[in-house]
Amino acid sequence: MTEKNWKLLNGLALAYMGDGIYEVYVRNHVMQKGLTKPNQLHATATKFVSAKAQARLMQQMLEQENFLNEEELEIYKRGRNSKSHTVAKNADVGTYRIATGFEALMGYLYLSGQQARLEELINWCLQQVEGEQ
C-alpha cells in the first residue's frame, strides 16, 4: 500500500498494528531496565500498555497545545470513533475508545513510514509513565 492508502485504512486496522508496535517498544524498554522474570516483565509492561495507561497518555497529548498535528488528530479520532465489538477487561467503554485512538495513531505513524515521529511520541510516553512511578 502507498502512504495515501494508509490514511484510508479503518481505525481498527490501524489500532491493530499500533497495538503490536507500541508493545514491542514497551517490551524493549522494560527489558533494557534489566528485568528478566516473566511476572516482573508483564507487570511493568502493563503500566505502559493497559487501556487505562494509553488513554491517560492520549489525554495528556491532547491537553498540550500543538502537540499533535491535524493529521495525527484526525487519525486518533478515527480510531477512537471506530465501532469495536470487543471491550477491554479492565476499562470502561470511553477509556477503551480513547486507547483505541492512541493505538490507531501509533499504527498509522508506523505504516506511513513516519519512524522519527513514532519514536518521538513513544519515547515521550515512556518518559511520562516512568515519571508517574
Image (cartoon, rainbow, N blue to C red):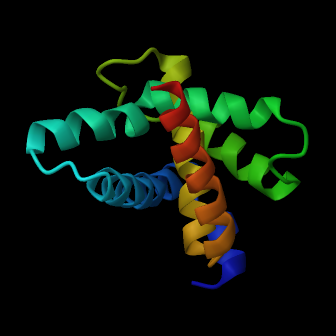
Q: Is residue 114 left or right of residue 62?
A: left
Where residue 66 sits in the image (x, y, percent)?
90, 45
Q: Do we see residue 57 in this rendering?
A: yes
The quarter of the image holding the N terminus is bottom right
In which quarter of the view is residue 8 placed? bottom right
Residue at the outermost top position? 92
Left or right of 118 on screen, residue 42 = left
Residue toward you, 55 or 25: 25
Location of residue 6 with respect to 10 vertically, above or below: below
Q: For residue 94, which quarter of the picture? A: top right
x%, y% of residue 42?
20, 39
- Whether residue 59 is situated above or below residue 28 in the rendered picture: above
Q: Considering depth in this image, is 29 or 25 the residue closer to the camera? A: 29
Quadrant location of the C terminus? top left
Give the percent coordinates (x, y) of residue 114: 66, 74
- Residue at x 11%, y 36% (from the top left corner): 39
- Residue at the far bottom: name it: 2
What residue is at 41 percent from the left and 51 percent from the top? 19
- Counting every numbered tag in the picture gives 0
Location of residue 34 in the rendering, given as x and y in whole percent from the top left corner: 24, 53
Q: Is residue 85 visible?
A: no
Left or right of 113? Residue 87 is left
Residue at the farthest right position: 65
Q: Is residue 119 left or right of residue 17?
A: right
- Vertically, is 46 above or below 95? below
Residue in the image at 26% along x and 56% along y: 31
Nearest the viewer among 41 and 22 is: 41
Q: What residue is rendered at 38% in x and 55% in y?
A: 29
> For residue 5, what is the image quadrant?
bottom right
